[in-house]
Structure formats: structure tokens, C-alpha cells
Image (tube, rainbow, N blue to C red):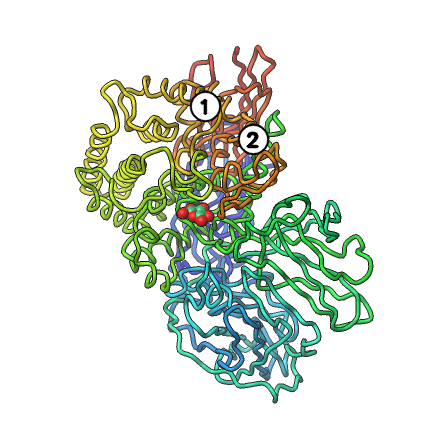
Amino acid sequence: MTRVRVSSVTFEHHREAFGIGEPAPRLSWTVVTDISGWRQAGYEIELSDGATTDRGNAASSGTATGRVESAESVLVPWPGAPLGSRERRGVRVRVHGTDGSASDWSPWSWAETGLLHPSDWQASATAPPSTLLGTPDGPALLLRRDFTLHGPIARARLYITAHGLYEAELNGRTIGDDVLAPGWTSYHHRLPYRTHDVTALLREGPNTLAATLADGWYRGRTFDRTNLYGARTALIAQLEITHPDGTTTVVTTDGEWRCATGPITATGLYDGEKHDARLHPQGWSEPGFDDREWLPADTLPHDPALLVAPTGPPVRRTETLAPKEVLTSPSGKTILDFGQNLAGRLRIRVQGPAGHTVSLRHAEVLEQGELALRPLRGAAALDEYTLRGDPGPETWEPRFTTHGFRYAQLGNWPGELRPGDVVAVVCHTDLRATGTFECSDPLLNRLHDNVRWSMRGNYVGLPTDCPQRDERVGWTGDLQVFAPAAAFLYDCAGPLSSWLADLAADQGAHGTVPPFVPWPPRYAAEHADPAWAGPAAAWGDAAVLVPWTLYQRTGDLGLLESQYASMQAWVEQIATLTRGHLWDEGFQYGDWLDPAAPPDQPGRARTDPALVATAYHARSATVLAETAALLGRPGDAARYAELAENVRAAFRREFVTPSGRLACDTQTAYALALSFDLVEQRERAGRRLVELVEADGHRIGTGFVGTPLICDALCSAGAYDTAYELLTQRECPSWLYPVTMGATTVWERWDSLLPDGTVNPGEMTSFNHYALGAVADFLHRTVAGLAPAAPGYRRLLVRPRPGGGLTHARARHDTPYGPAAVSWSSDGETLTVTAIVPPGTTALVDLPNLAEREVAAGTHTFSAPL
Ligand code: BGC
């Protein structure tokens, strides 16, 4: 039996490599072996001919590399000719170890390209006539087209997207399991389409392609604006059927489509959906339906050059939760408690008379036993279902909306509520979970769970700030601080590379990195006011720091290459705004939500915004210099390194006293100075930071900017105990205070719920915001001790720093080279650490009271005196 096995091969960062947009997808594989110290000496890649083989079956061999002497196994260049549109290839890999071992061939992995060239698209945009469109967030519209297939079907693919949100059907069957497709991107620059294998849904003879179309982000409301990308929604679809004789039939969105209103009388992402089941035209998406009363669709021009294949998985339903409790509120309302704050919607099973309307209202928290609706601001979060009056139960789930909620109030429920009648359906980008953390403190474990739930709640195709109120946009700063934690918990490089492409596109059009991405053209036009849309530190720095984080965690240099112009443009722009390298002018969010800021002035932090901005400018210039060096641009590397040095010097001149005190005596100022290497007197600065944290009674004093840095800053000053005191603090403000208050997600504010149980009076009070959960990265790297020492975890840093009375901790992460793990336990005298180092990697092991050592792949256990 061979002791070396290659796991299945993956393409780029795709979870599912179907309908991909890369003609030469880079390949990655992991090796499973029990041979300690295993390292790859070489690999062989074989590509199948593809076109005639079925998924999973062995294929006749086309291109083969022969043995390539290389240790690379992550994002290895595509070895064959670039693929054309609609091409399918199987790939398998065999590896050879430096010890002479060899694996068998891996199973075949398959990839299929979508439509790679604008000229592949024949479809026009089919738009419901204006007379059917309501005001934005009005009715969802039905579109249908009959067609006849004169011959058997060998294979069929549907390429589909929309201006708006769509759900498509073929012959009455729903196509795919996407939710809120096509997601939200910078539609005027990049509109993702999806590829579906619909072979099994078609038949010879009459067929019907149909879709329901809603306004969504395209035309519906974001904040208080509508028609963000256009006033007309439209479907863009191209169904390509290949017959056994090789001929094809193509059915597209064109002038042959017919439209009508349907059962969804209103739907919006903020306000919810209203569905009158009596208005459902029976059989409307099947052949034989009489649509003579329906109106012909318009065809609108669209630019096929904007259509892109997705780089990550779609939004899907990922879990359902039953209510934990049915409550009766003081005013007599029926409220379901799902025990978990989540993003998604309800699915109901209800029986009653025709025309009876049930209402479902959502909220994250209760106040005095009633739904707390104020934090939703202008989002009604109200779904309504009007019954058809079937003799049996009717099942319904809204389709074009999503809510952030833990509680749901049922209105007008007919009869008794039975178990299973209402479930919560969790919806988010269907990311692959890649990281876990657990330790001996249940409160820290709950904090970590809360971070994971907040990530789930805020990945709706794009990374958003919150899922509940009338906001839910891709605030750049929130992701900038959270990206390291995100990249550990989930494989998010694919979806985030799409978001970064949007950032670059919107940056180019807007002239600076917009405060949130996508940044709709209407905002660009209306918000010339720099206080809303000007360059802001820590937010705009997402352009540089998010790609950098992803590179550190995945080793994907290609991503840095793609983003380089955007990274560079940001740093260059800020360089023109500084005076003597100090960025002290213009609007800043600063250390947003400093706990001392008044509830209605979240930007009134104690730390000078100019200090924050200059520190970030130095950081981004440093990262840009390193990026330029990696990408083989030595001129740029030298220029940006010099810029970074100049900014650092300016920072010191302006903000650091000769003895190492900072002009702002705040936790955030010291956290920035230590983390971004801006202060030479590190020992003094570290000591002052400890003093400040102690003076605050070990309560957190940082906002969005200082929070991800402070624990690391303390540890870098050797103050591990202080970092643990801060981490395990339960009094408000602290990371664990919300946990003691029953939080099941990370809150936007340290005190979104005040100690007396009332909701913070600030109008901006979400209970599902991941930014302050950035500390999860510290849990992984320092509490458990699993960190990358080289990009992509090619070298691991095993450096747990036990403390805080913890007796054990462990973390696991699926690195690009395979699963890595660190676990430790302590009996008070001895620390025992086990590390799993993936094949092809090494680890630097740095334990207290033990000499540093380098270990090879395999499982290692160490003991150290405490
Ligand atoms: C969002 C934040 C965001 C901030 C910037 C808020 O309304 O929810 O998370 O970063 O605005 O000002």
C-alpha cells in the first residue's frame, strides 16, 4: 500500500470549478502521508481530453507534463494550452517525495469553463415592460419563454445573470440552489453570471425557460437611495443545448419572452417580501401554459464585456434552525426565539383559509420582552404570506430578501403553532470552513463562535458590515480589520478577490477608494462631500492590506499582481494629501467606536485621527514596498520603502516624545505605534500601554482601529498577562461583556446592549458586526499558537502563549498544504504541545522555556516546564 496520497486537485480558489472564467486555472493539491518530514521533489500532471468523458470517470490522457522537478503544490501554473469557452478538462496529479516515495495518480478533478469572451454571448437583456414595474422594491415579475427541442439532448448549459435578482426554472423545476443571485458586485464594471448543468431538466419536444426577477441591489433600496444601477431590471440568459450529433440549439433572452406580475407583490432586501399565494399562476413555468394575456418583454442592450464568471461560491441556504422557545410578549405577541442571531429568513408551513395573511417580523434582540425594532432604522424586515387556502399545509419562504434576526414575531397565525411550522433558514456565501478554535474557557469559546456567526451573517456574496438595518454594505474598514480572522475561519480568497476587483474598479471610477464597495454610481454622483466619500485611513487602506492578508494566508502572488495598480494608486494618492508626510487633513473615521465616544458620535475617538491616518499611511507604504519587491519591481520597492521611512520619521517627529511617549496617551495610539513599528523606544511605549490598560481596569479602550492590534502590541512588549487580562475581562467594555449578556454574534458597539439590558441609544446599533471580532486572529495565533511564518503557511509558526488561567487550547486550519493544528495543555507545571505540520511544510516551534527549533512535516509533541 502506498503511503503517499494526493488529494483531489483544486482550480484557482474555486470550491466548485464549474463555469469558471480562468482559461488557464492554476492548480493546487495536498498530500496525505504518514511519512514524517515528507517533502515533494517533483510532480506529474495529466490533463484529460475532457470533452467526451463524464465527471469522475477516468479519461483518456491528453496533455501530460512528465515529471517536473519542483516542490510546488499550491497554485501551480496550468500545464496545458489555455482553455476556450465551454471546455471541460479532467486533471490528475502524481507526486514524488525527496525520499523516493511516490503516490498513485489522484482521482480526476474536473473543471469547465464558462463563456470567456464577450462574443460568446448572443443573449440580449430581456426586460419586463415598464408598465409592470412598480416603484423600487415593488413586485417581483415573472418571465417565460417556450421553445421546442427537435432531437435528443446530450448536454445543456444555462449561462445566466440579471440586472436585479433572479431565480430561474426549467419546465417547472428550480435551477440550482443559489440564493440572491447574482449577488452584488460593481454592476457597471463587473456582472457575474452563473453556469448551470441543466441537461437533466430538458426533454425533447416542448420546454419552458422561466425566471422570477426582483429589484435587489440593482434597482431596490440601499440606505435611502433606489435605482442605484438603473431603473429597469432585466434577465440575461443563454441556454445552449448540444445534441448527440454535435449540433446545438441556443435559446436566449430575446424579444420572444412574455412577462406578468405574480404572487410576490413587493420585495426588498431591507423591507422584506409580500407573497400572495392566490396570485400564483399554476403551471406558469411549464410548457402548455397560456401566456397570451402576458405582456411581451422589451429587449435592452447590455455590454457582454461586463459579464464575468464567479470566483467563489454563491449564496446558499446552509443550515436550518428550529426555534428554541416560543415566547408570549408582555403585549401578547407570539415571538419565536431561535437562540442564535443569524442572517437569512424563515420558512413556514401554514394552513388556513384563502386570503388569510400571516406576518413575520424580525429583530435581533428584545427590549422589555418585545422586539427591539429601533436598531433596524429604516428596514421594515417584515414578510407577509397570504394563503392560497389549500386543503393541506402550504409551505413558503421568501426568495429575494434576507434579515438579520434571532427573534421573529408571528402575526395572525391561523390555529395552533406546531413544531416544525417555522424554521430559520441561514443564508450566506457558501464558503468552505477552514478553521476551528477551542479552549478551556467557555466564554472565549462562545466569543469565537460569535465571531464565526458574524462572519456567516455578513458574507452575502460580498463582505458587509451588518445584516439587519438599512445599511448592509461592503464597508472597507470593517473587512480591513477582520480579514486575518476571516481568512483563518473560511476559505474566502475566491469571493474576496471578486470584491477586490470591484474595489479597484470603483476606485478607478471614483478617484479614491470609496468608503464601501461596491460603490454605486449614484453615490459617486451624489456624495461629492468628502465627509462621506473622501479618502479615509484604515478604510481605504483595505486596498493594500486585504490583498496582503490574503497573500500571507494563501501564498497567492497572482492576487497581489492583480491588485498592484489599486494598491499603488491608494498609497500614491495619500502621499499627495500629506504635508511633510503627515496625513492630517480631511475627513477621517479614525478609531471609530472608541468606547468613550458618545453614542451619537461614533467618530469622536480619544485618539487623534491624524495619528491614525499617518500610522496607516506608513503601514500601507511599507506593505506596498514589500509587494513591489515580491513582484519584481525593485524601483517601486525602493521608492515606497523610502516613502514609508519618511512617513515613519514624520510620525515620530509629530507624535512621539524623545522618551517614547505618544502625543495621544491612548490604547489605540500605542497599539498602532507598536504594531506598525513607528516608535523606536519600544520598551517605554510597551510599558506605557500596559499602564494605560491597567489604569482602565483592564477594560478595552479601543475602537475599530486599535482593537485588532492591541493584544499583539501588548505581547510584543512582553506583557502577555496584561493581554490575557484584557482578553478575559467581563466588565463593559470588553470582548467578553457581550458574551455575559447572552450575545450570540459580535456586536457593533462594545455596549450595543447596555448593562441594564436596554439597547444603546445610538442610532447605529447592530448586534451582528464582525469588526470587533478581529481578535479571533489573536486567539488562533497566540492563544492556540497556530500562525503562518511564511506566505500560505509554507512554514508554520507554532507559538502558543498560555495564560489567562487557561488549561488547554487548540486550533486547526486547512492550510493550502493540508490540515495544520496546534493543541496544548498545561497542568500548571508542564506545558504539553502537539503540532501537526502538513506535508511539504516546516514549522518554527517557539515555546516558553524551550529553545526554538525547526521541525519538518509530521506530528510532533513537546513538553516544556512552565
Ligand atoms: C457601519 C460601519 C462602518 C462605518 C463607517 C457604519 O454605519 O456600520 O461598520 O465602517 O459606518 O463610518
Q: Residues within 10 Å of mark 1 (few under 14, many from 20)?
A: few
Against 155, residue 489 (above or below) is above
In whole angstroms, how far apart are the C-alphas of marks 2 and 1?
16 Å
In the foreground, 182 or 753: 753
Q: Position of residue 148 (x, y in %)?
A: 59, 84
Q: Is residue 249 left or right of residue 702?
A: right
Q: Give the residue displayed 82% in from the left and 57% down from the top.
A: 416
**Relative to residue 671, is residue 573 depicted above or below?**
below
For residue 753, say whether it is visible: yes
Q: Secondary structure at mark 1?
A: loop
**Residue under circle 1?**
696
Badge 2 amino acid = Leu
Q: Position of residue 598 (x, y in %)?
A: 44, 39
Residue 95 lies, in percent from the top left, at 47, 41
- Nearer the camera: disc 2 or disc 1: 1
- The residue located at (19%, 34%) in the rendering is 646
Question: Which one is in front, 492 or 294?
Answer: 294
Relative horizontal placement of residue 120, taking residue 146 as reference (left or right): left
Which dot marks residue 736?
A: 2
Please tell me whether residue 114 is drawn above or below residue 684 in the rendered image.
below
Give whichever of 263, 300 is nearer the camera. Answer: 263
